[in-house]
Image (cartoon, helix red, strand yellow):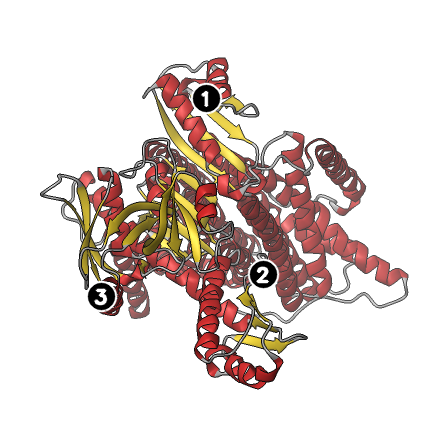
Amino acid sequence: MEFFHDVKVDWLGKKWYFLAFSMIFSVAGVISMAWHIHTIGSPVPLGVDFRGGTQVEVQFNQRPDLNQIRQAINDTGISDAEISTFGEAANNEVLIGLPEQTNESALDTGRQQIENALRAHYTSNFTVRSVQVVGPTVGHQLERQAALATLYSLLGMLVYLWFRFQLIYGVAAVVACFHDTLITVGAFALTNQEISLTVIAAILTLVGYSMNDTIVVFDRIRENLRMSRREPLPDLVNRSINQTLSRTVLTSGLTFLTVLSLFIFGGQVLKGFSFALVVGILIGTYSSIAVAAPMLVAYQEWRAGKGKNVSLPAAKRTRA
Amino acid sequence: MKKDLKNKIALIVVVLLAFLYGIFGVPSGLTPKDLLQSVRNRIHLGLDLQGGAHLILQVQVQEAVSAETDNTVQDITQNLQKSNLSFSQVYKPDPKRPDVIQVLGASPSQANSVESLLDGTRYANEYDVSNGANGTYTLTMKPIYERDLEQRTVQQAIETIRDRVDALGVTEPQIAPYGLGANQILVELPGVSDLDQVERIMRETARLEIHAVIGGPFPSREAALASMGGAVPPDQEIMPASGAMAGAGSGNDTFYVLQRLAIVAGSDFRSATPGTNPNTGQRDVNFTLTDAAGDKFWNYTSANVGKSMAVVMGGTVREVATIQSAIRDSGEITGSFSQDEVMMLSKLLRTGALPATLTYIDENTVGATLGADSIRAGVTAAIVGVLLVWAFMLVYYKWSGVNADLALFLNLVILLGFMGFSKATLTLPGIAGVILTIGMGVDSNVLIFERIREEIRAGKAPSAAVDQGFAHAWVTILDTHVTTIVSAAILFLFGTGPVKGFATTLTFGLAANLFTAVYVSRVIFDAHLSKLEPGKMVSI
C-alpha cells in the first residue's frame, strides 16, 4: 500500500499562498491576544496555576443547582466566586473559583470557606475532587519559568542545528517553530481556552516535534545538495520535500491519531494539553514544508541577489 | 542463521526480559490481579494519579535572623554590664531590618574596651561592626552569615516537617527545598487529601516554651501595661492566656507579664507523652528534657521555688504553675487541653519546633477518585492510540509492519521498565508522554521503511535496499531524536511535578526508540533476509 508515489508538486511556487495562510492565522491570533490583553490583562486566559487564586473541583451526587451553590457561598461573605459546571453534564461536576488572594497568610481561607459552606448545605452529598490554591509568588515564578523554558529549548535547538547544518538552517527552523508556537497559542486565545502548566509542556513538545519535521526535510536537502550541485536550489528543495512527503504525512498522521485518541479519551484534565497537540501537529507539519523550506530558499536567493556565492550548506555526512 | 545474528537476537531477548522485570518485578502470581499489583509496586504514580496533597511553603527566614539578633542583643547587654562598661541602650533600631543592632551612649572614655568587646570573636564572626558619633556602634549581620543562617533555617524546617509528616504515617512523602524561589519548601503527601488535617500539624509553629512569670493575671493588656509603669522593658513581654485555660473564664481574656527569654524551649524537650493525671483526671503531657536543658531547669527551679512559671505555646499562655520544688529533667504539664491538643502537643514536642513561621504559597490536592478516573482515561487513550498505530502499520507496510509493531511493543516495554527501575514517577501528563512516544517512535520506522522503498524503486537488491535504507535514515533519526530530547530535557529541568513526569517518559521513550527502531528492527530484517529465497522481495 502506498499513498504517495512519485509526487511532483511545486511547493515553492505556492509560497505566496502559504505566506498569506500563515499571516491570516498569525494575525488573527495576535489580534485575539491583543483583545485579551485589553480585557483580561494577559494575552491568553491563564489557568489557575499561572493566574493565582483558588479553584475547587466538586462532584455532587445529584445534579447540582448552580444558583443554590452560589447562594450558599455568598452566605459566607464571598461575593466574587466564579461557579461553573465542568466536563460532561452527567458527571455533576462543578468548578468553584476565587480570584487571587494577595495576602499570602490568608491564602487558604477561601478554600476553607467554600468547603464549609458546601458541607453546611449538602452535608456529605458531594466530594471535593481537587483543590488548587496558588499564591501570587508561585504564579509569577511559574510564568517566568515557562517563558524561559521555551526560550532555552529554541536556543538549544538553534545551536544544535547550527553545529550540525549551518546557521541559516537553524534560523529557518526556529522561525518555523516560533510560527507554530504563535499560531497554537493564538488558537487558545481564539477559542478562549485556558493555558496551564501542562499546556506549556505540550507547546514545548511541539517545538521538538515541529523541529523533527523540519529536520527531516533539511536532511534531505543537504543530502541532495551533496549529490547534485548544478540543480537550481528551488527545484532541489521541491524535490526534497516531495521525496520526504510520504514520511512527513504518515508520521504526522500517526502521531495525530494517537493525540486525537488522547483528546477524545484522555479526560478533562488533559483537554488543554491534547488540544495544543492536535493544533500544533497540524501546524508543525505544515510549517516545515511551507515556512522553513521557503525561507531557506529565500535567503539563498537574497544572497545571490547581492552578488555573493550561494553557500552550499552541505555539511559532512556522518555515517551510522 | 549466522552466529552473529543469533547473538543479536539473544541480546534483544535479554533486554526484553530485563525490562519486563523492571515492570513487574517478581510477581506473586500470574493472575491479572497479581500482575497489576506487582506493577503498582514497581511504578510510582504521581500525586495526580493516586491522589494526594502538594504544598509549597515559604519559610519566613527573617524570623530566624531576628531571633538570632535578639539573642545577641541580650548577650551584648549582659557582657557590657559584666565588664562594667556604661551604655544607654542596646537595641534593634529598625523593625524592617532584623539584622541590625545598635549600641547607644557608650562612654567615650571606655571606647577602647567597648570596641574590643564588640570586635571580639564572639561577634566579629557574625557581624560587621562600625562606630558612629556619641558612642554609637552599629552591628550588621554579615550577608554570608545571614545566608548561611537562612539555609540552616530552611533545612531545619524541612527536617521538622519530615518528622511531623512521618508521625502522621504518610507513606513516601517528599519534602525538599523547592528550587523555584528562595527559602521555599515543597511537600508532597501521597494519599492525603484532607488539607485541614495536614495544615493543623504543619502550620503549628508553636514552640513550646516555659517562661518565668513576672506579673499577672491581668484582666486586660492595658492593666498589664500599667503594672509596669506604662512601658514594657526590653527583657519582658505581655502575653495573653488562651481562653480555655483554667482560671480564665471563657471569652474573658487574661494577660500575663513574662520574662522574654524562655527558661526552656523547643529543642530542649527530649520526649513527651500524653497521659491523664491520676489525681485530677485532667489530661496532661509528661515531658523529659535534654541533659543540658535539665541542668538549666534545675538551676532555675531550685532558685525560684514558690514563684510561677508559664507554659507558652503558639503565643499564648496555656498553663501557669507554681514551682513546688526543684525539677531536673522531667515533669508534667497539666492544663485545660483537649484530647486533640494533648496529642498534638506531645507530637510537636517529640518533633521539635519549627525554626520560623511557614506560610503557604501554593497548595494542590487531588482526590483519589479523580486520580482513578485519570488513570482510566489515560490508559484508555494509550490503548486506543497503540491499537490504531499498530493496525495502520500492518495495513500499510504488510510484513514489515509486523516488524515495526514488534519494535514498538519493545519500545513500550523498555520505557515502562525504565520507569520501574529508576523509580521515576508516572503522572497523567507522563501517560500523555507515553502516548506521544508511540506516535513519535513509529516515526523512525516510517523514515526507515520509506527509505527502503525508495531504494527498492531505484532497483536495489533486498539486502542492499535494507542496508541503504537504514544507513540513510540513521542520520535523520539521530538529528530528530537529539532535538526532541533537548526540548524534553529542558522541560525536565524547568518543570515541576506532573510536567516533570511528562518530560521523563518522553525522554526515556525516545532514548529507547533509538534502540528498538534502529537496532531491533534491523535485526528482525536481517533474520528475515537470511531466510529470504533468492529473487524474492521483502514485504514492505
Q: Confirm whether residue B23 shows in the render.
A: no
Kind of residue at badge 3: Trp
Q: Which mark is residue B97?
A: 2
Q: Quadrant of residue A118?
A: top left
Chain designation of label 2: B
Kind of residue at badge 2: Arg
Please state which of residues B39 and B465 is positioned toward the viewer in this rendering: B39
Above or below for B194 versus B117: above
Above or below for B500 versus A114: below
Q: Quadrant of residue B214?
A: bottom left
Q: Which mark is residue B298?
A: 3
Query: Marks 1 and 2: CB-CB under 8 Å?
Result: no
Above or below for B49 versus B352: above
User: In the rendering, at what x and y percent does residue B402 appear?
Assistant: 38, 46
Residue beneath disc 1 = A88
Please state which of residues B473 and B364 is positioned toward the viewer in this rendering: B364
